[in-house]
């Protein structure tokens, strides 16, 4: 039994405990004066550094961080892929072992990528750009930008890229998602450092900059990275975010290319003292790639300065004839039509996979099994001794672009025995004895069309921009080779010969097809930045515009199609520009039955409103007899209102006694924007896009008559 302690004795004990605490604090925290001065100095340094704005420091960190991760990822992927090539060569001529080496390697990596990323979080699979577009439209997607998803996506994406060109997937989309997650985390760090409240506008500014960083650190192209992110991610762009995006993208692109230069110099320094008596060569038959014969990849000469990622040596004295503009227009039409077919088939395939009972069951419970089966199919088709020899399947994704941007005309080189005997050209992978250059390119386009569509259904972190970029380059290369075959001396038979340059058509095709699929015109500038060639800029822009005009008329973009298939909140563009569409007003499509509350409502009315609808916020009117809109109240506040007004002594099953009113106990937010019944559809649509609105109430003379949300506008 405890006895009460007298007040005086208790007070003495409290004082003694307080003295012990003070003694302990002074014991473990000595030199209070020095610490106080140091704290003052740190505060002064922070004020001086943040005088120009703390955003610039965090944007710099974002660019450098993502560039470093991108370079390390590419470096690791290249090393692992080189090891796979060595293993394939060391096996010898045993067909079964070569097949197992070719198929089991990507299948194991893809299966691990799918299983690992899905075990951490379900948000790590796919591109990530459709979800990010939805977030930038004002929709809250829980845990999508959480930092725990970062590691899962990095590991999963690295394993996906290690699979090589067998599954034909890229890096751009997931890396934009990674940049967004890093930006969200840096935004929280900024809030803790500056001791400011978390601001949604600041979060959006960091996310907008992260989009540009994601593209710039993959291609080393800051200008087109900013423009591409603006075109793809948001219909409206705030000019104040323009400089932030350029600054972060420039820092990221510069660091990405600088690391490549530093790595090449380090590699040269490491091998400077080693001079073999004879050049280190690989035996014949290493994948059959002639470029592997001269030296190993780590001994190949690398640039000593910052250069374009896919440097080309196209002639700039006479890049194209004026009459060739007609063929570039034809190229734009072809890319637009193929883009429409690709978008339709890809969206149909995504829906069909979800509706089929077998694939739906595998995607619901056994995603790694589905991934393994699909990758086994794709890698079996690309097996080099089989159909892969007609598709140049031994090339990597980068080697595909390097070969398609080759400055020489393959149709002239292929029949020439002296050219064919010279090693060192990637174009020879497209030259097969039983098929011409035109046959291999056409077969590549035919097979990769459906193989890429099937690959987009894989539940693993993967990008889809680089594959369509390469596919468009193949379309342009095929058309350029055909034109060069028809006009060997150029379009003017008289005068000096001015031969057709098929590589220029490959540049325009890559930009046109990728631009038509993504609804972007900046791909024309992206091609110029990644190749360092500006001679074909005008015909490339023309082809991109023609392809975009065709695709935008008939199909939603690739990322909008992903939003539709995933049932994310989506506001489609108004395609009709007819005068009659401007006569549609809000009164014709607004929601007329709106659950509203009065300021004098109590417990029973609030409970009935919450049961009647699941809205995030509810309109509050003056009274039941006077429906004048005075503000809104959130659902969370109404739940708190119910919890605080329950009678504490009410027995179970007994009716709760209402105490207090809504107007007295809840904070009613004022209405900042309301629509009129006569507001046009176009005005409401642009307001929803510009202000990132989710729901707006409609009033007539101040009285609530309806509401408009994304569903009604759509």
Image: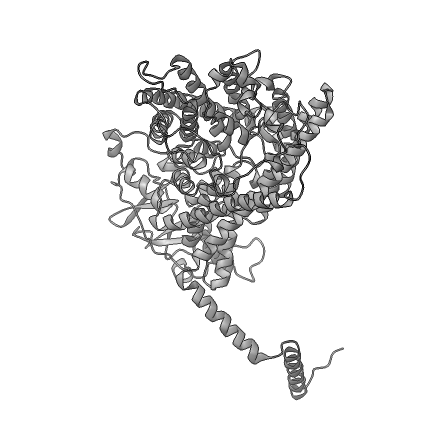
Q: Quadrant of residue 527?
A: top left
| Left or right of residue 363: residue 255 | left
Question: In terms of depth relative to the viewer, which is nearer, 19 or 619?
Answer: 19
Identified at 48% across, 58% down, the residue is 190
Question: In terms of depth relative to the viewer, which is nearer, 364 or 60?
Answer: 60
- Quadrant where the N terminus lies? bottom right
Taking the view exactly as shown, the residue that stands out farthest to the right is: 1
Q: Quadrant of residue 113?
A: top right
* Observer able to see residue 109: no
Taking the view exactly as shown, the residue that stands out farthest to the top is: 434
User: Eyeballing the image, is 417 above or below 177?
Assistant: above
Taking the view exactly as shown, the residue that stands out farthest to the front is: 277
Horizontal and vertical percent position of residue 578: 25, 28
Question: In terms of depth relative to the viewer, which is nearer, 639 or 515?
Answer: 515
Horizontal and vertical percent position of residue 451: 55, 23
Horizontal and vertical percent position of residue 250: 44, 47
- Quadrant where the C terminus lies? top left
Looking at the picture, the colour scheme in use is: one colour
Identified at 33% across, 13% down, the residue is 493
Horizontal and vertical percent position of residue 105: 67, 30
Question: In terms of depth relative to the viewer, which is nearer, 632 or 13?
Answer: 13
Identified at 35% across, 29% down, the residue is 317
Identified at 55% across, 59% down, the residue is 650
Taking the view exactly as shown, the residue that stands out farthest to the bottom is: 8
């Amino acid at each position: 039994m405890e006895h009460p302690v007298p007040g005086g004795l208790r007070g003495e004990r409290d004082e003694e405990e307080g003295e012990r605490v003070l003694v302990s604090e002074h014991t473990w925290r000595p030199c209070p004066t020095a610490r106080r001065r140091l704290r003052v100095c740190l505060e002064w340094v922070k004020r001086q550094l943040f005088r120009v704005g703390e955003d610039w420091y965090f944007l710099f960190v974002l660019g450098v961080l993502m560039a470093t991760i991108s370079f390390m990822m590419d470096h690791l992927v290249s090393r692992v892929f080189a090891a796979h090539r060595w293993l394939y060569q060391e096996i010898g001529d045993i067909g079964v072992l070569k097949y197992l080496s070719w198929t089991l390697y990507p299948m194991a990596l893809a299966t691990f990528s799918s299983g690992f990323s899905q075990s951490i979080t379900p948000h790590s699979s796919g591109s990530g750009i459709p979800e990010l577009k939805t977030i930038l439209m004002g929709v809250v997607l829980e845990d999508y930008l959480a930092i725990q998803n970062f590691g899962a996506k990095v590991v999963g994406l690295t394993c996906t890229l290690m699979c090589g060109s067998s599954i034909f997937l890229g890096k751009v989309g997931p890396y934009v998602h990674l940049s967004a997650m890093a930006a969200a985390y840096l935004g929280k760090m900024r809030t803790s450092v500056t001791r400011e409240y978390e601001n949604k506008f600041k979060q959006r500014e960091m996310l907008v900059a992260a989009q540009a960083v994601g593209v710039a650190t993959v291609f080393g192209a800051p200008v087109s990275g900013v423009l591409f992110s603006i075109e793809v991610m948001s219909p409206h762009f705030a000019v104040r975010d323009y400089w932030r995006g350029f600054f972060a993208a420039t820092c990221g692109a510069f660091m990405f290319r600088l690391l490549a230069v530093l790595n090449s110099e380090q590699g040269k320094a490491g091998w400077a003292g080693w001079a073999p008596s004879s050049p280190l060569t690989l035996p014949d038959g290493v994948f059959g790639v002639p470029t592997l014969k001269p030296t190993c990849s780590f001994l190949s000469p690398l640039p000593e300065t910052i250069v374009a990622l896919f440097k080309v040596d196209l002639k700039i004295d006479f890049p194209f004839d004026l009459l060739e503009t007609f063929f570039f227009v034809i190229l734009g039409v072809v890319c637009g039509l193929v883009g429409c077919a690709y978008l339709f088939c890809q969206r149909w395939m995504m829906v069909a996979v979800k509706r089929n009972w077998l694939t739906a069951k595998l995607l619901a419970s056994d995603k790694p099994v589905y991934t393994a089966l699909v990758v086994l199919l794709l890698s079996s088709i690309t097996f080099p001794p089989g159909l892969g020899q007609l598709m140049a399947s031994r090339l990597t994704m980068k080697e595909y672009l390097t070969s398609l941007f080759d400055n020489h005309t393959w149709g002239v080189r292929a029949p020439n025995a002296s050219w064919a005997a010279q090693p060192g050209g990637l174009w020879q992978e497209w030259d097969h004895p039983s098929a011409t250059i035109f046959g291999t390119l056409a077969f590549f386009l035919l097979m990769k069309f459906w193989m890429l569509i099937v690959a987009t259904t894989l539940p693993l972190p993967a990008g889809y921009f680089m594959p369509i970029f390469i596919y468009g380059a193949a379309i342009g290369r095929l058309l350029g080779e055909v034109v060069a075959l028809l006009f060997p001396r150029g379009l003017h038979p008289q005068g000096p010969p001015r031969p057709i340059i098929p590589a220029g058509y490959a540049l325009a095709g890559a930009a046109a097809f990728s631009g038509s699929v993504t609804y972007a015109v900046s791909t024309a500038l992206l091609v110029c930045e990644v190749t360092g060639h500006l001679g074909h800029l005008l015909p490339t822009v023309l082809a991109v515009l023609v392809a975009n005009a065709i695709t935008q008329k008939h199909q939603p973009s690739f990322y909008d199609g992903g939003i539709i298939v995933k049932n994310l909140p989506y506001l489609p563009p108004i395609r009709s520009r007819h005068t009659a569409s401007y006569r549609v007003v809000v009164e014709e499509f607004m929601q007329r039955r709106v659950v509203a509350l009065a300021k004098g409502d109590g417990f029973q009315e609030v409970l009935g409103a919450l049961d009647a609808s699941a809205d995030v916020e509810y309109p509050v009117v003056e009274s039941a007899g006077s429906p004048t809109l005075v503000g809104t109240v959130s659902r969370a506040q109404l739940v708190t209102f119910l919890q605080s007004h329950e009678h504490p002594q009410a027995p179970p099953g007994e009716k709760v006694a209402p105490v207090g009113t809504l107007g007295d106990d809840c904070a009613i937010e004022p209405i900042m924007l309301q629509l009129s019944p006569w507001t046009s559809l176009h005005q409401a649509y642009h307001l929803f896009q510009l202000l990132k609105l989710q729901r707006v109430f409609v009033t007539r003379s101040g009285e609530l008559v309806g509401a408009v949300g994304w569903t009604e506008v759509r």
